[in-house]
Amino acid sequence: MFLAFKEIKREKARYGLIILMIFLISYLIFVLSALAVGLASENTQAIKSWDAQKIVLNKNSNISLSQSMLTKNDLKNEKLGKKEALVGLTPIVAKSKGRETVSGQFLGVNKNQFIYKDQELIAGRKATKSDEVTVDQGFKDSGYKLGDKLSLNNSKKKYRIVGFVKNAKINIAPIVYGNIATWKKLRAVMPNFRASFIVSQNAKYKFNHRNAKTYNVQTVINKLPGYSAQNVTFEMMIAFLFVISLIVVAVFLYILTMQKMHNFAVMRAQGIPTKTLVGATMSQSLILVFSGVVIALIGMAATIAILPASVPMSFTWWIAVAGSLGMLLMGVIGSLIPIRSILKVDPAQAI
């Protein structure tokens, strides 16, 4: 460790460039990880807030919430308990005078069921009348206020915002909560349709009909448009960045080690054991990576502080820990490559 510090202190510019490279790679890993988690969260915020375990969809819907429709006949033998709720889902375009237009999802729910009761409000109250709605906090970020009246799609009827709900997004689109009757009007469905799907908080819940099937909630989430492809894309990018960091550390240390081979030979001739030289090289790698990661963490903290709330970035403690440990592991592996050359140093060369 002493030798590693001594050399880094002596060659500040050279090792400073290595730290800069590690900082940039680490920072990019943290940014991509935070974006991946943030976007995944905005895809599933509402479903997670319901504490959903099972979801009943039309069996011909291709496990798609937006394509599912359940009729009275499909549900005639089903008795919904306290942990089950009917949900009507339809895409909407919300407009209000003097406000920006917002594309979202309308969710029709029943007031006597848990999804309505469990809405976590950050302002206002729950909707009690047919012309009242509660909306995702994203509407508030877009300039909407309590009391604003919305036009939904081409409907002439106005709906007044009476509350803002925390974490109410699905497939990245903000949710407007209303009642089932309003959903039927917006979706323009026949009277025999009851809902889009059933949500259950009971992990053992199962209801199968010839036109309906019960799915695990994760199965439904994985089928959300773009969800799986988005996650795989981010995972591949992050994995490649870790590989790049490994290559950067290994190449720089190898070049530096080759330049110091004569010095190593002299130290070996002086009786300095090989394990001391190996330890110095590994310590040097860990110091460089640790320094770059710490600077990247500081940079991420500053980035999160200045980013607007509309950016879907979620930098959690486990991202910081996993990213840091991953980079340190790459540093250790990268230092093993030049170590092989150190082990082959012949003290006789120096003599």
Image (cartoon, rainbow, N blue to C red):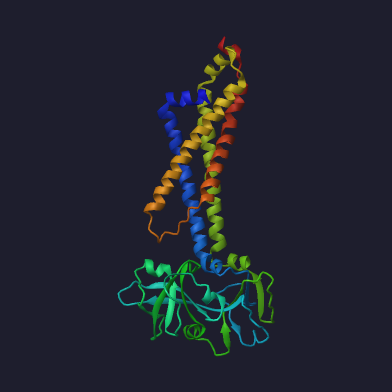
In the image shown, does 262 or 167 lie closer to the viewer? Answer: 167
Above or below, 183 relative to 330? below
Residue visible at 59% across and 64% down?
222
The structure residue drawn at horizontal position 43% and vertical position 73%, both measured from the top left corner, is 135
Residue 200 screen position, x and y as percent: 62, 73
**What's the residue at 61%, 18% (across, down)?**
273
Where is residue 148? Give x, y as percent: 35, 77
View extreme (top): residue: 351
Residue pushed farthest left?
Answer: 98
Residue 214 in the image: state x and y as whole percent.
Answer: 66, 74
Q: Is residue 110 above or below residue 281?
A: below
How many numbered marks are there? 0
Q: Nearer the viewer, residue 178 or 40?
A: 178
Q: Nearer the viewer, residue 70 or 241?
A: 70
Residue 59: quadrant of the picture: bottom right
Q: Position of residue 178 (x, y in %)?
A: 47, 80
Q: Residue at x 49, y 60 (%)?
A: 39
Q: Is residue 164 left or right of residue 235?
A: left
- Residue 218 relative to residue 173: left or right: right
Quadrant containing the C terminus is top right
Q: Is residue 125 above or below residue 337?
A: below
Q: Residue furthest bottom?
A: 191
